[in-house]
Image (cartoon, helix red, strand yellow):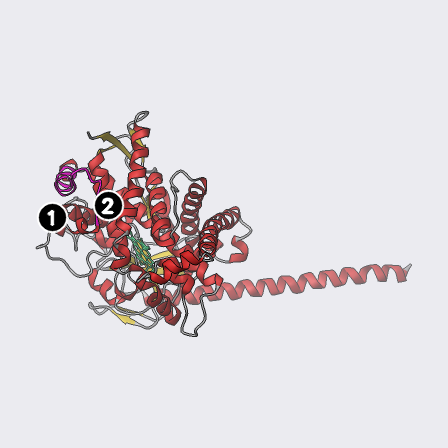
Amino acid sequence: MSVSLLSLTRPLDTVSGFLQVASLLGLALLLLKAAQFYWHRQWLLKAIQQFPSPPSHWFFGHRQEFQKGRELQELKKRTEKYPCASPRWLWGSRVSLVVYDPDYMRMILGRSDPKSDGSYRLMAPWIGYGLLLLNGEIWFQHRRMLTPAFHYDILKPYVRLMADSVQVMLDKWEELLTQNSHLEIFEHVSLMTLDTIMKCAFSYQGNHQADRNSQAYIQAIRDLNNLVFARVRNVFYQKDIFYGLTSEGRRNHKACQLAHEHTDRVIKLRKAQLQDEGELEKIRNKRHLDFLDILLFAKMENGRGLSDKDLRAEVDTFMFEGHDTTASGISWILYALATHPEHQQRCREEIQSLLGDGASITWEHLDQMPYTTMCIKEALRLYPPVPGVGRELSKPITFPDGRSLPRGFLVLLSFYALHHNPNVWPNPEVFDPSRFAPDASRHSHAFLPFSGGSRNCIGQHFAMNELKVAVALTLLRFELAPDPFRIPVPTPRIVLMSKNGIHLHLRKLL
Ligand code: HEM
């Protein structure tokens, strides 16, 4: 009897001993984490003591600013109350200095700080380490390799391809208008800009605006825009292992797969075409290779070609950057013109006198629409398609007003806040294209839709051409007015979106 009792109690002792040790270890780990949190927070608080900000919660930070879609309004209030820059806490141990002053911008963009790992890293499962996410020497090699893809000899013939894609979209609008004169344009414009980048950069033929795969890709990008943005702000979603277990994590994984299926298809097709001697001969005769061909024929410093992983990352990066930013730009510009009929009409008259019916818009025309260009820039000021970018300071910085930040600190360059800062742009909410008149003066870093410095947008000339072609051809075909019942609500994501879409009233012109 006593022997069997002993044999029963021994395993019980072992289990409870194990549980005690585990709880002690758990408690120690928790205390260690709490101490880490405390010391890190103290370091951050000391670093930003010279920069006042609105009151924040010790754990939830400025979360109330992000809720209820008030983020952009709150940013504007900051520009009025806190000069140049102010700290914004995402949670108790993550803070960035939000910058909205041109001199501050110039200082930061003139350095070579890397992209902030905390936010950009979360895009890596989707676009990989291509030009947008790379840093240091490898970024420099890729930038040098890809810059020739934006040479003006390459960009020139794209104007025709851009115009074709825009006309397909406008034909579709004409058909839809027989049923309803109101239209949500963002999705149509996204399909059109995707079509354009596929034809220009990836030599992909055909009409993709009615194609199911393109629609699925656009939807995946919409989801990823939302999911990545939400993840950046959620303290519990930072670790991949935990995020992967959540429903958002699973949706993110699924959307990445969908996006990759699309880009893999494009790469495969081009590789297959290049098996053909005739196609290879065409490439040999070209003075400048286009984007995908540069990647496929690339030889890096070590003499080797790009790995499949690096190639896919660049294709994913350009497929996304090359269409979603321009879709946001074009949609918001059309909305801005819809709400300012007098400027819309002046642009239309300028374009009519230049192009007649617009059937043959060319590269040469793009420099001959000064008023339309001023309106496009003013709309990019009010609605910058990329609302902000992040950097992690690789060395300490002292700003022109003497305030400073230590190495390792995160900064968010808010182009949206810069463009709405009343100290930089008087009456910032007023749509006034004369701000961009040839004789108007402004700070070199007051208007930064394409960022600045060495990491500025590599596709900015491509983008400006596409914006001009799309705006010119649309104004020739339609008169635009806002839908008074569905006013768009600007919402920051990786690109600037509208919470409720962009609804316009369109009237076909003769
Ligand atoms: C209106 C349209 C566009 C806007 C407003 C825009 C804006 C920007 C901004 C602000 C950046 C800096 C991002 C950062 O620092 O994190 C950037 C970078 C970049 N953009 Fe654009 N972009 C546009 C169109 C395009 C197009 C059409 C392409 C490609 C065809 C493109 C490709 C890129 C790439 C690859 C980078 C990373 C460059 C680097 O870091 O070296 N963008 N863009």
Q: Is residue 221 in sight in this rendering?
A: yes
Nearer the observer: mark 2 or 1; the answer is 2
Residue 377, image x, y percentages: 19, 50
Is the shortest distance between ligand 1 and the CB of mark 1 under 8 Å?
A: no
Residue 115, quarter of picture: bottom left
Mark 2–mark 1 distance (CA, rounded to whole Å): 21 Å
Q: Position of residue 98 (x, y in %)?
A: 30, 58
Going by the numbered disc 2, the residue's amino acid type is Val
Against 143, residue 78 (above or below) is above
Q: Nearer the viewer, residue 29 or 202?
A: 202
Residue 200 lies in the magenta-colored region: no
Q: Nearer the viewer, residue 429 or 365?
A: 365
Work out whether 143 lies above or below 414.
below
Viewed as shown, does residue 54 lie left or right of 225? left
- Which label is found at residue 434? 1
The furthest residue to the bottom: 302
**Does the beta carbon of the residue at mark 2 sit less than 8 Å from ligand 1?**
no
Residue plotted at (12% across, 39% down): 349
| 110 or 287: nearer the viewer | 287
Q: Which residue is mark 2?
A: 469
Magenta span: predominant SS is helix
